[in-house]
Image (cartoon, rainbow, N blue to C red):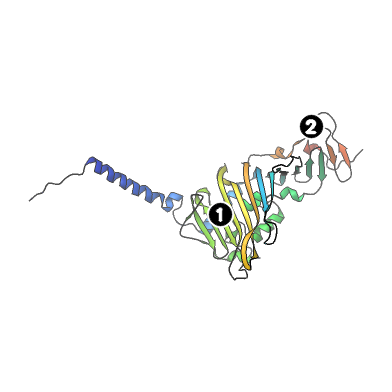
């Protein structure tokens, strides 16, 4: 005996179809493919792709506000010492430009105490308002810049390159062919991704020493890192560095860089009879402008106004005439008349 079968209504079919699509999109979004990954990447893959970004950077110019905080010790003052400066930095090949101007605090009088250091590959020019000091050596200030070294891992001087190797900066810390024994320690990519700033990140870990969160959508750019030091007196590792990098922008094709970064250094101290881990120094940088591979040699060749005093190791002269001259038109070895 045949029984009649009730067909589903159009409304029921629509509900079923919507439910099926929801499951499908949910599965796709939460799959590794949705995050640009066919499978969990290897440490080598992360290292090579992250390193590629730095290899694409041939020149850089940066304007940023930098805040430095030095926290008192357990028995020191309660309020941290804070300095804020507006900084400009640029490099192209062996050329450098570095400028730092203090930002006055509430109630402070604004003052023009900025100094610009320009190194043209042979000579350092230190530009003050109305003065140009000339040195035949590269001034250390030309390379003193935190953003490139600490957050982009761009070592621009031999000293910084040596420091970078010892401090195991990212992505060099993941180098599969290490020059130091410490590099042979096994970094591993954890099977589960974790969100940082709402973005799914691969987690790379050196057990008990280092933990990094890298964004596969941005060429494995670093979003967060926590470094641990050797065990303290209580035999447990303690946090020594905490990096955060956010507000990424594609400054050049395939080159993602953060516009907001911070680095906190920690120390261990006794407080109320207990060993505590607390901040020692904090650096926060807010990038206002950044250009990658968009400057040429003329960027390091500004105008010098008439009546500017030029000073080298043998004496001084005054720029004559009524028109500005270019920095590279100055003879560093001039002799006063």
Q: In the figure, 129 relative to 169: above or below?
A: above
Residue pictured at 77% horizontal, 49% vertical: 139
Query: In the picture provided, is 331 more to the left or to the right than 263?
Result: right
Q: Among all residues in the image, which is located at the extreme right?
A: 337
**How many angstroms separate mark 1 from mark 2 (CA)?**
47 Å
> Residue 290: in sight, yes or no?
no
Residue pictured at 27% horizontal, 46% vertical: 16
Secondary structure at badge 2 equals: loop
**Are there few (<14), some (14-19), or many (20+) residues within 10 Å of tag 1?**
many
Circle 2 residue: 324
In x, y percent, where is residue 107? Answer: 71, 42
Query: In the picture provided, is 326 more to the left or to the right than 191?
Result: right
In x, y percent, where is residue 111? Answer: 76, 40
> Which mark is on residue 208?
none
Depth check, mark 1 against mark 2: the one in front is: 1
Between 53 and 97, the residue placed more toward the observer is: 97
In x, y percent, where is residue 127? Answer: 78, 41
Between 86 and 144, the residue placed more toward the observer is: 86
Q: Are marks 1 and 2 in contact (CB under 8 Å)?
A: no
Q: Quadrant of residue 76?
A: bottom right
Q: Quadrant of residue 176?
A: bottom right
Secondary structure at badge 1 equals: strand
Q: Quadrant of residue 243?
A: bottom right
Circle 1 residue: 224
Count of numbered tags: 2
Q: In the figure, 48 relative to 61: above or below?
A: below
> Residue 24: in sight, yes or no?
yes
In x, y percent, where is residue 84? Answer: 68, 46
């Amino acid at each position: 005996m045949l029984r009649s079968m009730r067909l589903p209504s159009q409304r029921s079919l629509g509900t079923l179809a919507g439910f099926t699509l929801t499951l499908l999109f949910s599965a796709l979004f939460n799959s590794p493919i949705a995050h640009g990954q066919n499978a969990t990447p290897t440490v080598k893959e992360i290292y090579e792709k992250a390193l590629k970004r730095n290899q694409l950077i041939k020149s850089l110019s940066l304007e940023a506000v930098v805040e430095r905080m030095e926290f008192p010790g357990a028995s020191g003052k309660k309020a941290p010492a804070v300095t804020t400066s507006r900084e400009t930095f640029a490099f192209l090949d062996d050329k450098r430009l570095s400028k730092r101007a203090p930002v006055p605090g509430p109630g402070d009088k604004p003052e023009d105490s900025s100094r610009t250091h320009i190194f043209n590959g042979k000579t350092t020019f230190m530009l003050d308002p109305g003065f140009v000091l000339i040195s035949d050596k590269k001034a250390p200030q030309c390379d003193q810049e935190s953003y490139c070294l600490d957050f982009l891992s761009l070592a621009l001087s031999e000293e910084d390159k040596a420091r970078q190797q010892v401090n195991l900066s990212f992505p060099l810390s993941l180098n599969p062919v290490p020059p130091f024994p410490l590099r042979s320690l096994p970094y591993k990519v954890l099977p589960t991704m974790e969100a940082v700033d709402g973005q799914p990140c691969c987690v790379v870990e050196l057990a008990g020493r280092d933990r990094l969160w890298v964004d596969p959508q941005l060429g494995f750019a670093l979003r967060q890192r926590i470094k641990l030091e050797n065990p303290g007196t209580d035999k447990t590792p303690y946090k020594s560095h905490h990096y955060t990098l956010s507000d990424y922008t594609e400054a050049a094709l395939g080159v993602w860089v953060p516009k907001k970064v911070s680095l906190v250094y920690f120390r261990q101290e006794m407080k109320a009879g207990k060993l505590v881990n607390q901040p020692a120094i904090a650096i926060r940088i807010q990038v206002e402008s950044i250009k990658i591979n968009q400057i040429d040699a003329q960027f390091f060749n500004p105008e010098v106004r008439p009546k500017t005093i030029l000073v080298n190791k043998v004496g001084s002269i005054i720029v004559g005439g009524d028109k500005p001259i270019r920095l590279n038109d100055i003879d560093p070895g001039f002799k006063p008349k």
